[in-house]
Image (spheres, rainbow, N blue to C red):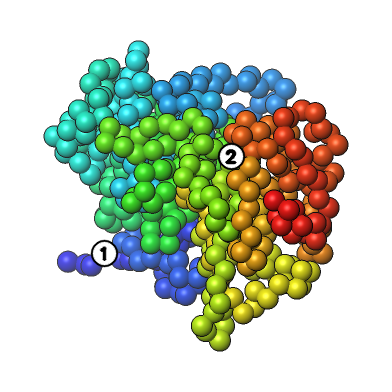
Amino acid sequence: MKSPKTVFVCSECGAVSRRWAGKCPECERWNTLVEEEEAPPAPTPARGGSGKAAGKAERLSETSLPAYIRTGTGMSELDRVLGGGLVSGSVVLLSGEPGIGKSTLLLQISQSLANGRRVLYVSGEESRGQLKLRAERLGVQTGEIYVLTETNLDAIERECTRVAPDVLIVDSVQTVYSDRFTSVAGSITQVRECALSFISYAKESGSAVFLVGHVNKEGGISGPKVLEHMVDAVLYFEGDRRQSYRIIRAIKNRYGSTNEIGVFEMGDEGLREIPNPSEVMIEGRPLSVSGSAACVVMEGSRPLITEIQALVAPTAFPSPRRTSDGFDYNRMCLLLAVLERRLSLKFSTQDVYLNIAGGMRLDEPAADLAVATALLSAITDTVIPSELIVFGELGLAGEVRSVAHAEYRVKEAARLGFRKIVLPKRSVAALQGKVDAELIGIGSIFELLPILKKG
């Protein structure tokens, strides 16, 4: 018996090579070639006899607009991330670490989606009994919810034809396999072809499809990188399994913004929405302790108030330690260099630890001034007043630059009781009289230290 031939497939671009190489010859990524059994060639249909209507080009001016129908999932936080709801005929890839709450979320929204519609929940990891126990714990009992525990693609397609669901949930796409390929489930070929089959079903039937994706040890989605390009939306579940708060972030969304986030809390009865995450983020904020600064950032159209914590201590090593959690490490080192050069503060002899409370990740430049404030407070052991909040971008010369959506940030800070708001000087004139708070405009980092000492 002749042994099956093997090829090497790139996990990033899907390119096929007969020999292994350290770098993919197509996308030039390193260590992405994975060995798989060669798939049999697909039969080539005769010319004009494929059975499908040949595609014809038409003028753009004559093309009709598609009627995208959005359906509420029953969770406004998830609807916000999706861009207003679930779009019919769309394919959403939901990924995250094991145990983060992906299956719990999809089972919870199934009850709301099943009001007047059919939901088919395909599980390749849990038995029907396990799903029933989870559903009873979450209070999911009513609605047209069908459960299928199957991993064979052909069997799933047959049930989709029989049930004709309006919403199809596949948990997870890495467990599904097709008999047309000899590679094991979860391989690059199987994941790509099975996902392509579900995408074709969604576009032809108009059903919305949720695909659950595993993550690899690097934190990326398992399978070929092209999987993220094929689907309409990619949602990523963030958070620590040992903590209760979870954040859903859209990495890609063809029907909405990729800047929105949804905040949830994991409890005994499943995921609970956090409609006002700012209050949660600053809950339990320590008072009369140096190194704690409040900052207001924008996540899409939503202003969020977060707590930035800094700790500065004399180092016991020849090279001081630098640790950052939730904030870009290189950006923190840049801000430390600005503070040391412009204000003559000796961070070079100190260990520096920076943390964003609540598991948030701050990416926008508006957090620069708050991070600098926390570092200043920590190294000088100066307590920041609890009613003081800071935002603004910091340049290499120590100048404070204005940021977008200053009015939204100021109003959110005033709503939560902050009475002193430090912000870029250029934004003060347009905001005077609009909020019941003292607006302190500064133009450089040199003006910040007297404000902290004054309190």
Identify the disc placed on residue 4.
Answer: 1
Identify the disc placed on residue 304.
Answer: 2
Q: Is residue 404 left or right of residue 22?
A: right
Frontmost residue, 429 versus 30 = 429
Which is nearer the N-term, disc 1 or disc 2?
A: 1
Position of residue 219 relative to residue 135, above or below, is below
Query: Answer yes or no: do the residues labelled 1 and 2 have beta carbons within 8 Å?
Result: no
Q: Is residue 27 left or right of residue 40?
A: right
Visible in this render: residue 235?
A: no
Position of residue 328 relative to residue 341, above or below, is above
- How many neighbours does mark 1 have within 10 angstroms: few (below 14), some (14-19), or many (20 or more)? few
Residue situated furthest bottom in the rendering: 318
Residue under the point 43% across and 26% down? 75
The image quadrant of residue 264 is top left
Q: Quadrant of the N terminus?
A: bottom left
Q: Is residue 392 left or right of residue 131?
A: right
Visible in this render: residue 289?
A: yes
Residue situated furthest top in the rendering: 116
SS at circle 1: loop
Closer to us: mark 1 or mark 2?
A: 2
Q: Amino acid at mark 1?
A: Pro
Frontmost residue, 322 versus 82 = 322
Q: Amino acid at mark 2?
A: Leu
Position of residue 111 relative to residue 105, above or below, is above
Residue 363, image x and y in percent?
61, 52
Residue 183, image x and y in percent?
28, 56
SS at circle 2: strand
Residue 440, image x and y in percent?
78, 44
